[in-house]
Image: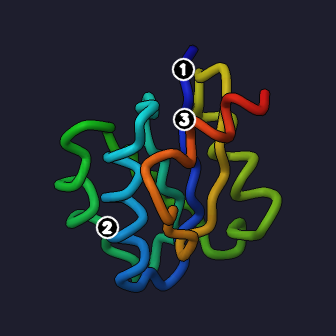
Amino acid sequence: MKIDVVIPVYRPTEKLRKLLIAIQKQTIKANSIILLHTVDGCDLDWAKALGKVVPIIEKSIAKEAFDHGGTRNIGMEMSEADIVVVMTQDAVPKNQMLLEHLVTAL
């Protein structure tokens, strides 16, 4: 079973780095992490370096197309996984069991 994590990113803070590190350490490994961000003012080159266990895919979208539902839909359409977990950029898991608990519930 493949799991992808989709994260819309707007004006990222340190929490995004912590989130990406936490996703890398989950007991059930994600297939990939898809980061969606606006074209202007969001450089995520540093994030790709964190994709040592789980690859990080970055996609820029136009600022006017960046919204709550549409952005998440773009990420889901990019995924070929069986399960897609959509997160916010500041939701740092408290432990390594987040994906395991979510998948078990399904």
Label 3 Cα neighbours within 10 Å, binned few <14 / some 14-19 / many ≥20: many
Which amino acid is tagged 3?
A: Asp
Which amino acid is tagged 1?
A: Lys
Q: Secondary structure at mark 1?
A: loop
Work out how far the residue at label 2 is from the one at label 3, CA to CA, in angstroms: 18 Å
Of residue 98 and residue 43, the one placed in the foreground of this image is 98
Q: Secondary structure at mark 2?
A: loop
Residue located 31% across and 67% down the image: 44
Q: Quadrant of residue 1?
A: top right
Of residue 103 and residue 60, the one placed in the foreground of this image is 103
Q: Which mark is residue 70?
A: none
**Residue corresponding to mark 1:** 2
Q: Are marks 2 and 3 in contact (CB under 8 Å)?
A: no
Q: Quadrant of residue 29?
A: top left
Residue 89 locus on image (x, y percent): 54, 70
Q: Nearer the viewer, mark 2 or mark 1?
A: 1
Q: Which mark is residue 44?
A: 2
Which amino acid is tagged 2?
A: Leu
Residue located 54% across and 78% down the image: 10
Q: Quadrant of residue 49?
A: bottom left
Work out how far the residue at label 2 is from the one at label 1, CA to CA, in angstroms: 24 Å
Q: Which residue ends up furthest to the top in the rendered image?
A: 1
Residue located 66% across and 36% down the image: 84
**Residue corresponding to mark 3:** 4
Residue 76 is left or right of residue 52, and the answer is right
Q: Secondary structure at mark 3?
A: strand
Residue 30 is left or right of residue 52, and the answer is right
Q: Are marks 3 and 1 in contact (CB under 8 Å)?
A: yes
Q: Which residue ends up furthest to the right in the rendered image?
A: 69
Residue located 51% across and 62% down the image: 93
Sequence-wise, the earlier of marks 2 and 1 is 1
Of residue 73 and residue 90, the one placed in the foreground of this image is 90
